[in-house]
Image (tube, grey):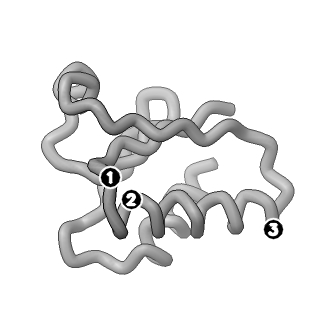
Amino acid sequence: MNIELYSIRGFTGSALKQKLEEALAAHQVPCTLVEIHQVDQFIKAGLASVPAFRIGNKVIQHPHDGDVDETVAKVLAFV
């Protein structure tokens, strides 16, 4: 399974990546997490805002003032 993380480089994107990698490893979920930082790729994916995860056709956006753990939980629940 391939999970894409669309984000600008910074704290929130890094925190989301780290927490998701830890959660996937803890639950022994085999997948590949790819980070995408190019704005043209955000537009191509049709994203209204970043950070956001895309798993197949499903997009899970991280709210501007949202909790990292809640967003990671949403990704895990979908996976």
Q: Residue furthest right?
A: 28
Residues at marks 3 and 2 touching, judged by CB atoms closer than 8 Å: no
Cα gap from disc 1 to disc 3, whole angstroms: 25 Å
Residues at marks 1 and 2 touching, judged by CB atoms closer than 8 Å: yes
Residue at x-position 58% and y-position 64%: 18
What amino acid does circle 1 point to? Arg
Residue at x-position 20% and y-position 23%: 40
Q: How many marks?
A: 3
Cα gap from disc 1 to disc 2, whole angstroms: 6 Å
Residue at x-position 27% and y-position 49%: 8
Under circle 3, the secondary element is helix
Q: Which quarter of the figure has residue 31?
A: top right
Residue at x-position 60% and y-position 41%: 33
Rendered position, 73 above or below 65: above
Query: For this rendering, which residue is in front, 76 or 37?
Result: 37
Residue to which mark 1 is pinned? 9
Cα gap from disc 3 to disc 2, whole angstroms: 20 Å
Q: Nearer the viewer, mark 1 or mark 2?
A: 1
Report whether 56 appears left or right of 21: left
What amino acid does circle 3 point to? Ala
Under circle 2, the secondary element is helix
Q: Position of residue 63 (x, y in %)?
A: 24, 66
Query: For this rendering, which residue is in front, 62 or 13?
Result: 13
Q: Position of residue 60 (x, y in %)?
A: 37, 50
Q: Position of residue 12 (x, y in %)?
A: 35, 67
Residue to which mark 2 is pinned? 13
- Residue 78 badge: none
